[in-house]
Amino acid sequence: MRAAFRTGAVAAVAAAALIMTGCSADAGSGGSADDPVELTYWAWAPNLDKVVDLWNDENPDIQVTVNKQDGGDPAITKLLTAIKAGSGAPDLIQAEYQKIPTLVSSDALADLAGTSAADLSGEFPSGVWDSVTLGGDALYAIPQDTGPMMFYYRDDIFTQFGLTVPTTWEEYAETARALHAADPSKYLGTFSSNDAGWFAGLAQQAEAEWWSIDGDAWGVGIDEEPTQKVADYWGGLVEEGVIDNKPMYTPEWNAALNDGTQAGWLGAVWGPGVLSGNAADTAGMWKAATLPNWGSDASNGNWGGSSTAVTSQSKHVDAAVKFATWLNTDPDAVQALVTETGIYPASTDAAASTLSEAPEFFSNQPDFYDVAAEAAQSVAPFQYGPNVNVAFSAYNDEFAKAAESKTRQAFLDAVAAMQQITVDDLESSGFTVAD
Amino acid sequence: MTATVEAPSGDTRPARRAPRHPVKRRTAARRHVTPWMMLAPGIVLFTLFMAAPILYTFVLSFQKELVSGLGLGSGSRTRTFAGLENYVATFTDPEFLASVGRVLVYGLILVPTMLGLALLFALLLDARRTGAKGFSRVSIFLPYAVPAVISSLLWGFLYLPAVSPFYWIFEQLGWDDVPSLLSPGLVVFAIANIGLWGGVGFNMIVMYTSLKAVPTEIYEAARIDGASERQIALRIKVPIIMPALIMTALFSMIATLQVFAEPTTLRPLTNSLSTTWSPLMYVYRDAFTRDDIYSAAATSVIIAVATFAISFLFLRVVQRRAFGQED
């Protein structure tokens, strides 16, 4: 009994001591090896903790703890809840580019324009830098990775049916028709109502501007010519029946990638990870090319990609910036990010120096990263708005109906509905919406 | 009846006299305090984890967040009183009304089928000549132990023609045009089937347990009077376990209104399910996809009130029939 009490007392004192050190670390801005600044980092990229271990070994004064999250959406929901509650947010968070306006509008991110991070603009492609500054004077995050879109195709099936790699969307449509005519069970791709980011990337390539800032008002341009053109194109192919209408990332889609029913995929630079995970038996059969184009000018879209942001609740903004800068621009760190997490780095120089050897799944294509670099260079600028979540869930619902009905008109109606839902949401939230 | 009415009045008499005697007053006070102390943990937990969140949901449902300007930068969002705006928005949204309609169809398919099968299995298990009762009972009940998300994933695989063994068999048999259960017109059956698979066992156990509680003398008397097994089942067993049938019907109806896990898990597999297929999915979308907890709160209140109303009406309608003979 007495022994138990003593242990309890010791534990209590130890806990109190821990709390005290916690407090003193909070109060000071700079850390030392004995009294390090402790940062928490919410992230979902696999194995990111291994990259952070490199930092922790070299920087005893700033120790970073990775708190693994389920994924992009849940992490943001959790962060927004912590911001509303006034406490509980981490110092750093992995934020997808399309989430940044939502986070900024909820006052969740610290403005880094006054810190050393502001000097990094030259490290990144200007389209990427725009998405962390929202085109203004503020700086809300440091870019980590990007997802320039690419066209993946089954080289063996293309050879078998004598198909050539399409470079324009017109050629893509012809190839899709030729393949489906040669073998009616096969498709060159599918139109997925599950993946709003994928469709946004295709619209971005066509130079759509889904959101824009017009003085003190937001402009919404979803239902305009570029996106209508993309929707009309895909609606036509689905109506014709030469492109499948089933969602991606289902067991059925995985099976189709494996057995060649899906002979192509409009993916992004992170595609090798998806293909090797979902269709492991097809290693060495795929090849990557740049996305087909609308005209003579090379243009591209982004699907995915994320940044490292400092939250508005962080008490160690400078230390957090120091870490985030190292993580995303230091050659060793970027190299570790590439090998451990499999991302495509946003930093131009780092990408060039770290990505030389093709991914194992694409060992048949030694120039994989040359194609990727070409794809990354031509990414068109794209502005996300404060209610991407609403527009994206509208995409899921409206394009699910359109894909199921398999008519070109339904695809155009879906674009109009997306526009309506997005504008209505902005207006009911009190935003000023430009006409 | 009369005895129970008299008992409390007999108890109050000494209590009224109590103040004249200090000793008795103290015991009376203790008598008042003790039950409260025993109730306290329950009351505290109920207040903290039931009443307070419900009240907070209610408060939230009358508010909204307003943005000024571009909504960038700190302090651009303010919480304001919204009156009935959120409620009006939910009631006038055709998507919400459609989700209610879908769930009603789902319930009309699921509840009678599930309870019918559960009753049939319970009666079969209770019949004298049935063998392997333990095994049958466990194997019918087992699906209930599988979480809805897992069972939806399992069934999702079985529904997708490209990966389903059923469709492989159909193909071998030369049936090429078997429609997918995930197509728009049939998806409600696909979801009801998952609910059925998981729910029959539970309801069967409830009915079977109440059948076991029936004294066997009644059956012996019926047999002596020449009743067949089927007559015993329909004329004696079913009426006797009517309260259990009503309870399972009520629980099933409430579960129907709250269907969420099955359609949410199946949604990414098909174009036929929207993010607002059921009312609870509608709430989930508002709260977690649109970050609009205020609208979500209002819709939650509407669903809760509707659940209460339907349960109450249902009990009113069937109560007399079910519990009539107990009075």
Image (tube, grey):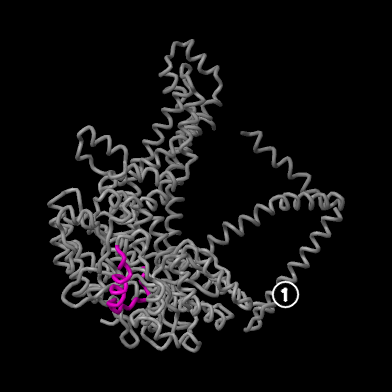
Q: Position of residue A187 (x, y in %)?
A: 20, 54
Is residue B313 visible to the viewer in this orientation of the structure?
Answer: no
Within the image, what quadrant is residue A230 found in?
bottom left
Nearer to the camera, B196 or B326: B196
Within the image, what quadrant is residue B326 found in?
top right
Q: Residue placed at 42% from the left, 65% from the top?
A: A342
Q: Residue placed at 48% from the left, 15% from the top?
A: B222
Quarter occupied by the C terminus of chain A? bottom left
Q: Is A37 on the left-hand or right-hand side of A286? A: right
Q: Could you classify mark 1 by the number of other residues whose Cα lies within 10 Å: few (under 14), some (14-19), or many (20 or more)?
A: few
Q: Is A20 on the left-hand or right-hand side of A119? A: right
Q: Position of residue A82 (x, y in %)?
A: 53, 70
Q: Is A149 on the left-hand or right-hand side of A75? A: left
Is residue B289 visible to the viewer in this orientation of the structure?
Answer: yes
- Whether residue A76 is situated above or below residue B120 in the rendered picture: below
Chain for numbered disc 1: A
**Mark 1 residue type:** Met
- Whether residue B308 is situated above or below residue A118 in the rendered picture: above
Nearer to the camera, B308 or A215: A215
Q: Secondary structure at mark 1?
A: helix
Segment colored magenta = A365-389
Q: Position of residue A369 (x, y in %)?
A: 33, 69
Residue pointed to by mark 1:
A20
Q: Position of residue B90 (x, y in %)?
A: 36, 63
Check if residue B124 falls in the magenta segment: no
Q: Is B15 on the left-hand or right-hand side of B245? A: right
Nearer to the camera, B169 or B223: B169
Instruction: Report the label total.
Output: 1
Q: Residue placed at 52% from the left, 25% from the top?
A: B134
